[in-house]
Amino acid sequence: MLENKIALVTGASRGIGRAIAVSLGEAGAYVIVNYAGSEDKAQETLALIREKGGDGEIFKCDIADENECSEMCKAVLDKHGKVDILVNNAGITRDKLVMAMSDKDFMDVINTNLLGAFHMIRNLSRNFLKLKGGRIINIASVSGVLGNAGQANYSSSKAGIIGLTKSVAREFAGKSVCVNAVAPGFIQTDMTDAMPQSVKDAAIETIPMKKMGQPEDIAATVKFLASEDAKYITGQVICVDGGMAI
Ligand code: NAP
């Protein structure tokens, strides 16, 4: 289904990014597995892709750093000639109530989650406009749709991702490049494992389906958006959240 496609997934060493990378690799895409620091985990993702019959490579890059980003994009384009599918997945949290949140807490999250995605899109924009038919899929969050106490920085970054998605979708639509966002709800990964059990239990109570999602739930939606079947969908935000944002 995605044979001869080159996919680049940011933050693919763990969690949702790993599930997306494995799913795109299994579907036939050659996957660039980006990571910030966890080389061993990125190698594990690549091994999982190969177990499923796919292939790819790992690439270390801090997407918040424009120089590192442009070097990664240039190296990938020099080697492979194109990127068909960009998944902006890398993200961090620094949760705090707003009264205790420093500028650094706020900007660290904005710089990775929002500026990082912008860097990737800008560095690959010529590539996409030449391709005529590529896909950009940004991982937002229900927190960016609804807001969330303790996440002023994170919610702002994810609401920003939604605005970025809609603006770039309008800019690239004439070249048949589809740009969409997937907004996960509460998904079981290292990010949510770090939360106290009482906070997790309270969060699960707010989910109409009364359970957390799995990284594979997000990967299935991303795989669909990356496919030919989704060629007339652009500028959308698809919540994959067990009903949280109803
Ligand atoms: P995770 O398990 O904490 O994994 C985060 C990934 O992002 C890792 O691969 C990490 O790489 C990478 N990363 C972090 N900073 C980076 C940077 N500056 N440059 C490149 N890579 C970087 O997170 P997750 O739960 O899978 O979340 C993935 C995405 O889904 C995020 O955008 C998150 O906001 C979003 N999301 C998650 C949930 C949820 O419930 N889990 C809900 C809504 C949205 P290293 O391993 O090298 O550190």
Image (cartoon, grey):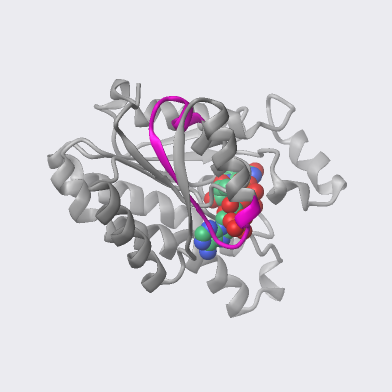
Q: Nearer the viewer, residue 116 or 109?
A: 116
| x then y, percent, for residue 204 | 75, 35
In the displayed orientation, state which residue is furthest to the bottom.
Answer: 103
Residue 222 seen by the camera: yes
**33 shown above or below 208:** below
Residue at left 59%, top 29%? 216
| x then y, percent, for residue 53 | 49, 25
In this picture, residue 175 sits left or right of residue 227: left
In this picture, residue 239 sits left or right of residue 200: left
In this picture, residue 5 sits left or right of residue 208: left
Which residues, given as a range, are shown in magenta?
Answer: 23-40
| x then y, percent, for residue 128 | 21, 47
Q: Nearer the viewer, residue 207 or 75?
A: 75
Q: Nearer the viewer, residue 138 or 199?
A: 138
Residue at left 61%, top 35%? 215
In the displayed orientation, state which residue is furthest to the right.
Answer: 198
- Whether the magenta-drawn stretch holds residue 57 is answered as no
Q: Nearer the viewer, residue 13 or 56?
A: 56
Residue at left 58%, top 41%? 45
- Whether the magenta-drawn stretch holds residue 39 is answered as yes
Residue 147 seen by the camera: no
Q: Quadrant of residue 106?
A: bottom right
Number of numbered discs present? 0
| x then y, percent, for residue 86 | 36, 45
Residue at left 51%, top 40%? 183
Image quarter in which the C terminus is found = top right
Image quarter in which the N terminus is found = top left
